[in-house]
Amino acid sequence: NVYRRSACRLSVVVPTWNEQRFISGLLKDLQAQSLPQDEYEIIVVDGGSTDGTLRIVQSYASRAENLRIAENRGRRSSSGKNIGASLARSPYLLFIDGHCRIPSKTMLADVLTTFDAGAQCVSRPQPLVTQGPGLVARSITLTRSTALAHVPGSMIFQSRVCWTDPASAGCGYTRDLFRLLGGFDEQFDACEDVDLNLRVRDLGVQAYHSPKFAVQYFARENWHALARQM
């Protein structure tokens, strides 16, 4: 492996578990970024997937020197993110779930520029897209995209550029800040990011929020899946 460790400036941590439907799209988006590949690394931390997720990731890793795979025996996203952060070679951490797409080819470059300018935390819009056909899937996407589904003041669907409370949409941190916070609380099997971001807020740190950092999430495709998520 001729990967140049000293050149790595941004670490992208991707926790996965049974994401075979989506992981290929995310990895394609990450590899298509404008940032030179020797300046960022992708760390996929898998929680014991029983579908084809690992096979897909391994296929990409065999062709990409900046992609590494780690095992998450704790299975939860919180422990997966902590493992990825512990393996990071760069001063900045960005967390992206395995079931996302990245609409902008300059997203990583824009995040890195923001960190280099002095931000300790970045925040992003997370618009929903429909993953299945039919009225139910579209209805879930539309409903989850309204104020009914989020607390007042949430930045998840806000596209303005501003400094903001990190609580609702913080997604990236300097490694020093992340270590100061002690990482994600692994007791959480959901909303571990909210807990971490509340601790960021308690330190008086604001997040730089921009649509340039946006990722698209796939909404649940039926009422049963939505109920499980909630």
Image (tube, rainbow, N blue to C red):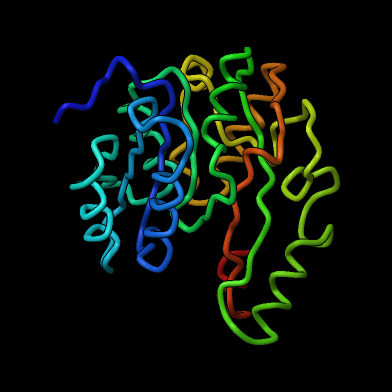
Q: Quadrant of the N terminus?
A: top left
Q: Quadrant of the C terminus?
A: bottom right
Describe residue 199's horizontal placement relative to residue 52 as left or right: right
Q: Position of residue 201 (x, y in %)?
A: 70, 25
Q: Residue at x 38, y 41 (%)?
A: 79
How many numbered callouts? 0
Q: Residue at x 81, y 61 (%)?
A: 146
The relative height of residue 79 versus residue 128 in the rendered view (above or below) is above
Q: Position of residue 78 (x, y in %)?
A: 44, 42
Identity of the residue furthest to the left in this view:
1
Q: Position of residue 63 (x, y in %)?
A: 21, 46
The relative height of residue 31 versus residue 59 in the rendered view (above or below) is above
Front residue of this view, candidates 69 and 71: 69
The relative height of residue 35 versus residue 150 in the rendered view (above or below) is above
Q: Residue at x 58, y 76 (%)?
A: 221
Q: Residue at x 76, y 70 (%)?
A: 142
Residue 83 appears in which quarter of the rendering? top left
Residue 19 appears in which quarter of the rendering? bottom left
Residue 6 appears in which quarter of the rendering? top left
